[in-house]
Amino acid sequence: MGESMTTSNRTKSETIQAIQEQIDEVRLLTQSENNNEVKLEEWRISTSRILQRAFSNASVAREFLLKTDAKTFQDAGVSYLEGLIIDVNKGLFEKISPPLSSGSDLIDLQSFHVIIRRIMRNFYKHIEEMYKKPVHGRGTIRQEDLAKISLGNEYDVQRMLFSLIRPIFPEARVEISDDGGYKSVRYDIYLREYETVIEVKCSRPKMSERELTEQLGSDAFHYREKYVYFFIYDKDKIIGNVDAFCKTYHKSLDIDGKQIETIIMQPVVM
């Protein structure tokens, strides 16, 4: 299974227990009448996250994902996890190894959220650099062509935001439908491997702050993923106090184990 690696911030017994709990969970899940592909896929992703936290080398979680798919991951996944337990007991993961090599492009969960937040919080820097600053005189891109591009609604914002995210996270997808229980929901930007949804909103002149809040509340309630970001392009500045809105809204939606964060962009016109 792997060469010598270290378990990260865990004792041997804690690592074995965490792996065994995932084995027990999927066995109970497959025996349940509520067994379905969605729940099994959630188990697969959850297990990969546990492996990322448990082992210093991310290849363990990556190998688990590569060995499992929608049709075979129950047997293949359990077999892989049982093999991990054997290797941990043998001490194969106790020798400290160097961190991931520079050739590895796997982004861990903590780094993922740092990158996603940075992309959204610096959204305007992309607009300024790409569309507002004077073009080079020797280039073929013309200022008048760039001036024709504007963000008129949430579909425009979603397109631009997705174009910034996908080069870094190629597995990201847009307009993904899911069964939220009471009704089907649509994820604007979905990163399944990181259990993350980004909902994009764009204000309108006749939209009130209350209406926007009600929309976000409904979305947050029905979204099934653990991490939910609301990216609000408030081009009409309907939000009176951005800092208070983000703080209050975050607290009011901290439910069902979801981690919800709101990021608001308002145009600055001098």
Image (spheres, rainbow, N blue to C red):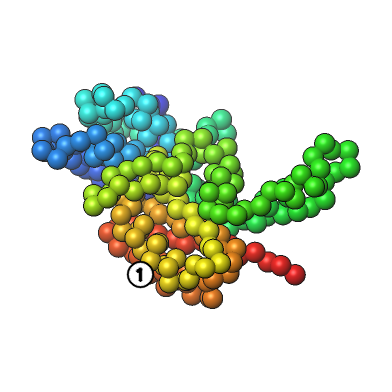
x, y percent for residue 225: 34, 49
Judge by depth and name the residue closer to the eye, 263 or 64: 263
Judge by depth and name the residue closer to the eye, 21 or 146: 146
SS state under label 1: helix
x, y percent for residue 262: 47, 62
**Outermost front residue:** 206
In the rendered image, the quadrant that contains the N terminus is top left
Judge by depth and name the residue closer to the eye, 192 or 151: 151
In the rendered image, the quadrant that contains the C terminus is bottom right
Task: Give the residue displayed 53% in from the left and 49% down from the top.
Answer: 155
**Label 1, residues with CA under 10 Å away: few <14, some 14-19, many ≥20:** few
Residue 225 visible? The answer is: yes
> Residue 187, relative to residue 24: is it above or below?
below
The tally of labels here is 1
Task: Give the residue displayed 57% in from the left and 37% down from the top.
Answer: 167
Q: Is residue 161 left or right of residue 54?
A: right
The amino acid marked with disc number 1 is: Ser
**Outermost right residue:** 137
Residue picked out by circle 1: 252
**Quadrant of the image occupied by residue 164:** top right
Task: Give the residue displayed 57% in from the left and 49% down from the top.
Answer: 156
> Residue 43, relative to residue 198: is it above or below?
above
x, y percent for residue 15: 28, 42
Residue 109 visible? The answer is: no
Q: Is residue 138 left or right of residue 253?
A: right
x, y percent for residue 235: 60, 63
Task: Give the residue displayed 51% in from the left and 35% down from the top.
Answer: 170
